[in-house]
Structures are given as structure tokens and as C-alpha cells.
Amino acid sequence: MEDGSIFIKGVQYSAQTIVLPNSNFEASASTPVPGWTGSGATLTYETGSPYAGTQSLKVSSVSQYGGAICNQKWACASGDQFFVSAAIKSDGTAIPYLAVEFFDASNAYIGGIFAGGSTSTSWSVYTASGTAPANTVFLEIHLQNNAASQPSACYFDNVTVDRITILGTNVGDGAANFSATASVLSYRPTSNPLVGHDSGGSAEIDISSFNMLTSSKGTISYNSGSVSGLSYDTLYYVYVSSDPTLAGGATTYAASTTKTDALDGVGRLFVGSVRTPVSGGPDSTGNNDGGCGAQAGQTNVFSFSASSNTNSGTAVSGSIGSSSYDGDLTTYSAVRITNTNSSSASISSTMSGMPAQIVPYTSVTLYCRSAVPTNNITGSSNFCKITYSYAGGSGTILNQPATTTRAVTTDSVSLPTSINLGTLQISTLVSRNNGTSQTLELDLYEVWVVTTQ
């Protein structure tokens, strides 16, 4: 250029890591392996020569393509680009691959990205990149053995999948070349105004009044509203349908299952997303992910993937299981004590298996939905408790007083933003020492964590 400076033009990229559950396989030393399910294979741990930490995943296949399938699925669309990486080795016979597999709306496999393919018995990091094909709706992550000769074993560690965004091939024109409409503002709702509701026969989304903080137009206030006639158990993206002059006040809201619709117009502003409840289910809360530009980033919902139970004494029944972390707020695990003698009894459980990663979150909230429908036990030594613990802290969610019941209630606890979710555990204890004929029941509907980056 005339002033002697150099202008370099090129493609710029941004990567967003997909948070895999237990991607380094350190979440638990016990099986089943948290976050992963075997298919045509047995999943155990390699502790003799792990790639990193104290253990790696060992996949012992009995059929071609047998392996481990991640318990989560991720929504994506055709054209989405990905970069994948994993540490892999073979027993000399296995042909291991990290596979990101794409599926269409009918759950049919339509393509994939594969890293690996060597029979080397030494650890190596394999990488690959690719693009989701046409008609892609979601992806799965598999750690598989492609060898035709079986049985054989292969090993995996430090699995990562990044979603790649092309930022552009040029320096942007700059805000001075645009009028100040919703399409060029950075903005963010200062509250979480969305609630999903079963209105009888269909779902609706209620939007409470809220303020929209903007980068150059101050704070804009919007009135409450609703969107009705929606499907149950569906993720919707809610937006102001038309406010090109940023007037605020009374407005019309719209909801779409396609996120880009929320920004496809100069008068549209993205308010946030919310999944509507199942039919007959409780109200659902928005994901607090509205805005465009300088706002809090992606909201993630994490579930536990493993539980263990210990019973002591007589007349105890039930256990805490997957119904307490299946993502369905209407199902639950029930534990009950009914004693008719002087012996003590208790049921304790522990939930674990969150992804073992430390991410710079801006907020971390633990939610616990539970009920105590029956409780006629007396005495201070009889109790029903739900507690939580993590590396560096602990606390109590529920400590139900004697002889008192509790309707279905969702409790929330703010956790440190520096938490390693892989260390988070939930413990329940239903205990009875009194010798008369009395009953105590705990129903645990769901425990989950919501993070904002």
C-alpha cells in the first residue's frame, strides 16, 4: 500500500469444540464407561500403557465395525465443517477409526469423517476434516474397529471434535457503511424471558417483558407476548419478527425450528431458544442464549451418565437410575423404605459421569427436580437428603424434615465457573432408624447442569 504497510488477504477460521462426555475416559475407573456404549464390542480401560492420565479406552471387538458409540447426538446441517482428532493405537490386528457419522431426518447414515486406519501398536494422534453432506440433520461419534478379522482390540484417548466456521475472505466493510438496524447491532437480552408451557392440545412459548441491551442504541424495552400452536418437546428459536426502527414496546414474536430464521430480516432480533415441554409435562425454561454479537456464548445442557446404589436393612425398594438423567422431566426413579421392626434401613446412591473438562464458563447452574410424596417417619435420626460434591466444594440441595412431604419441585444451585464437571457427583440418602411402621419415599425426576460460555 502507499504508506508502506502490507495487506494480507486470506480465509480466517474459528473453531468451536463440541463438548464430548468423558472424552479422555478419566471420569470413572468403573464400567460401564460413562458417556459411551459398546456396540459389537466390550468397553474397558487400558491402564498399563495409557496415552495420557491414568487410563485410556480399550475397545475389544467381536465383529467388524464393533466399537464405542457416544451417548449424545449433536444437531448439525449440510455444509457444516468439522475437524476431528484422537490418540489411537491397535493390538496389531484391529483397524481403529474415530468416525463422525452424519444422519438425515429418517435416521439414515449418509456419510462421515474418519481419522485413523493404522494397525500400529504405538500411540499416535490422528486427525481429519470434512463437511456434512446434503440433508444432514444430526451427527454421532463412533470409536470403531474396521478390521474384518475378529476378535481384536484397539485403544482411544483424548477425542476432540471441532465445528469450523469460516469467518470470511476479506476485511469487513465496517459499521459506517451500514444503517443502524437490528442486522448490524450487537445486542443481548438482560434477562431470560422465555418459558415453554403446555396449553392443552399444543404447546406455547410465553415471553415476559424484557430489556434488550444494544451496542449503540442504548437499552430497548419490549412488552410481553406469546407464540401458540406449537409442537411438544421441540426446540424453538424465538425472535422479534419485525422492528426495523428499534422502537421496542408492543411487538409480534415468532418461533421457528430453524435458527437462521431468527436473523433473516433487518427487523428481526433473536430473543433466545427454548424446548417446549412434553405433553402434560412441567413448564420449561429458556436457554438464555439470545442476542447477536457481544453477548454470552453458547448454552450447554449436561446430564449425568452413571449411577450406583447401596441398600441396607429390610423393607427397602427401588434405586436411582437412568430415569433421573434421561432428559425427561416427567419420568423419575423412586426409592422407598417401609419398616415394621426396630432395625435400621437406608438407601444411598451416587450419580456421576459428567464430561471431565474445564471450560471458561460464565455461569454454571445445577438443577435438581424431586418430590417426597410419602413421609410419616418421625425422629431426628430419620431423614431424606440430596447433596452434591465436586473437587473443591460440596453442598445440600434437599434436607427434608421428618413427617413432611414435598410436591414436585425444581431446585437450582449456582456452581463455580471454574468447576471441572467431571468431578461433580450427586448423592441421595433415605435413612430410617426408628422402629415403628412408617414409610418414606423419594422420587428423583431429573438432575442436570446448564452452562453458559
Image (spheres, rainbow, N blue to C red):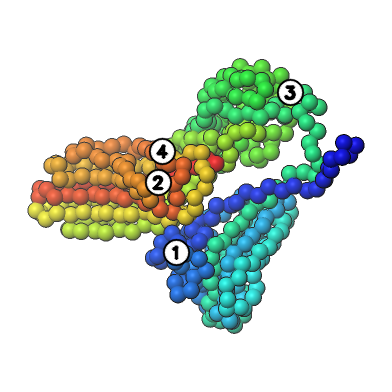
Mark 4 closeness class: few <14, some 14–19, many ≥20 residues within 10 Å: few
Residue 41 seen anywhere in this rendered image of the structure:
no
Of marks 2 and 1, the one in the foreground: 1
The local secondary structure at tag 2 comes to strand
In the rendered image, residue 409, in percent from the top left (x then y), is placed at 35, 37
- Name the residue tied to disc 3: 180
- Mark seen at residue 414: 4
In the rendered image, residue 392, in percent from the top left (x then y), is placed at 37, 48
Q: Is residue 345 left or right of residue 451?
A: left
Residue 349 falls in image quadrant: bottom left
Q: Closer to the N terminus: mark 2 or mark 1?
A: 1
**Residue type for callout 4:** Ser
Looking at the image, residue 380 lies above or below residue 55: above
Say which residue appears at 21% left-offset and 54% top-offset: 346
- Residue that extends furthest to the front in the rendered view of this protein: 4
Q: Closer to the N terminus: mark 2 or mark 4?
A: 4
Looking at the image, residue 29 lies above or below residue 269: below
Point out the image quarter for the N terminus. top right
Q: How many marks?
A: 4
**Residue type for callout 1:** Val
Question: Separation of disc 3 and disc 2 at Cα?
Answer: 43 Å
Mark 3 closeness class: few <14, some 14–19, many ≥20 residues within 10 Å: some
Q: Are marks 1 and 3 in contact (CB under 8 Å)?
A: no
